[in-house]
Image (spheres, coloured by chain):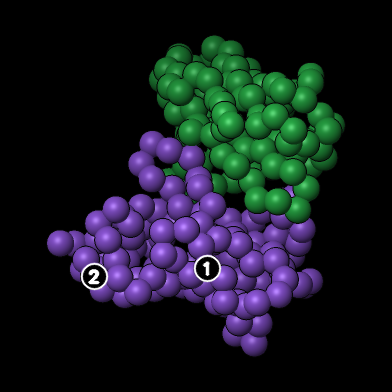
Amino acid sequence: DAGVIQSPRHEVTEMGQEVTLRCKPISGHDYLFWYRQTMMRGLELLIYFNNNVPIDDSGMPEDRFSAKMPNASFSTLKIQPSEPRDSAVYFCASSIRHQPQHFGDGTRLSIL
Amino acid sequence: AQSVTQLGSHVSVSEGALVLLRCNYSSSVPPYLFWYVQYPNQGLQLLLKYTTGATLVKGINGFEAEFKKSETSFHLTKPSAHMSDAAEYFCAVSKNTDKLIFGTGTRLQVFP
């Protein structure tokens, strides 16, 4: 089975540009999670969905960040406008209720 | 509120030596506990989990962990380290596996 697929793997862009990160969860999984990993703050949960509905977005840093899940097989995390402090590795994970989360390989984002 | 403390951000062992990575948790309800491993430029992979039942949990790659309620601990061990074990290890706690709270991680180095 294919795992969680994230794209792009690397993104380098200039401050102020819009950034869109994409995630395809494992087929049949009804939970989807977005995390951010930095040296300073470690691994932070940004938002998670259940059956395409956002359940907890308390980790989203500010209004510049938004996430959508239009269907069960696709989610996006958007940053607009981007800032250098948004540079991090962003992970998507998916799961079935009461089962462990499966992580994608992440998107390494650099904002210049 | 739930939290996880991983003692020691870096641990170094010789190949063949015992590996011990420490994790203490705080939870107001019976916790679900996890250990994940992260290799460079990859996402997190589940090593093992504790939900209910037997307190000694065996995972992949020869790792195991013991849930000790009286000590609020879930330390990860492996009797004999291998070079391929070098990675970052994360302990996580959850009320129900839907939302994980991660520790800050422990980087394991293995010397020949």
According to the picture, the residue beneath numbered tag 2 turns out to be B16
Mark 1, residue position? B58
> Disc 2 or 1, which lies upstream in sequence?
2
Chain of residue at mark 2:
B
User: Which chain is in purple here?
Assistant: B
Rendered location of residue B108, percent (x, y): 33, 60
Is B84 rendered above or below residue B72?
Answer: above
Residue A39, relative to residue B51: is it above or below?
Answer: above
Q: Is residue A107 above or below residue B51?
A: above
Which residue shows up at 48% across the image and 33% down it? A105
In the picture provided, is B23 more to the left or to the right than A65?
left
Residue shown at 44% from the left, 66% from the top: B63
Q: Mark 2 belongs to which amino acid?
A: Gly
Q: Tag 1, which chain? A: B
Q: Position of residue B102 (x, y in %)?
A: 58, 56
Q: Colour of chain A?
A: green
Closer to us: A108 or A71: A71
Farthest residue toward the left? B112
What is the CA distance from the residue labelled 2 to the residue labelled 1? 19 Å
Q: Which residue is drawn at 46% across and 23% down?
A: A9
Where residue A51 appears, as percent x and y from the top left, is 83, 33
From the viewer's side, name the closer residue of B70 and A41: B70
